[in-house]
Amino acid sequence: MSEPAHHLDLRYEPSGYRYYLAGRPVHAGDLVEHFSAAAGWQVGSFEWSYDPNRPPSLMFDETRGVLLRDDDQLRWL
């Protein structure tokens, strides 16, 4: 059975801002799945500049990715 979908949660910690997914911290390079109506679930690599004013992204391969929105559905592999 697959893990249910979650949304990213941006939190402030003493070391700075960090995104969490389903209560776990998300690190640059972590593999997560992203859902879109057009493509279904796709595995991508989480990327973020650590600037809370810029959205993180998910890279599906070297040329395809998506900027993540607050309402995007994600899950751990």
Image (cartoon, rainbow, N blue to C red):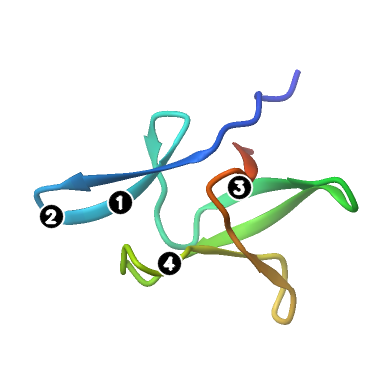
Residue ID at (69%, 80%): 62
Task: Out of 60 and 40, give the one closest to the viewer.
Answer: 40
Q: Say which residue appears at 69% left-offset and 70% top-offset.
A: 65
Say left or right for 51 vs 66. left
Tally the marks.
4
Cβ–Cβ under 8 Å for marks 1 and 2: yes
**Which amino acid type is shown beneath numbered disc 4?**
Trp
Q: Amino acid at mark 2?
A: Ser
Residue 48: mark in rendering: 4
Q: Secondary structure at mark 1?
A: strand
Residue where numbered disc 1 is placed: 18
Callouts 2 and 4 close, C-beta under 8 Å: no
User: Which mark identifies residue 32?
Assistant: 3
Can you tell which mark lies on residue 15?
2
Which of disc 4 and disc 1 is earlier in sequence?
1
Query: Is 67 placed above or below 17 here?
Result: below
Distance (Cα) linking label 3 and label 4: 14 Å
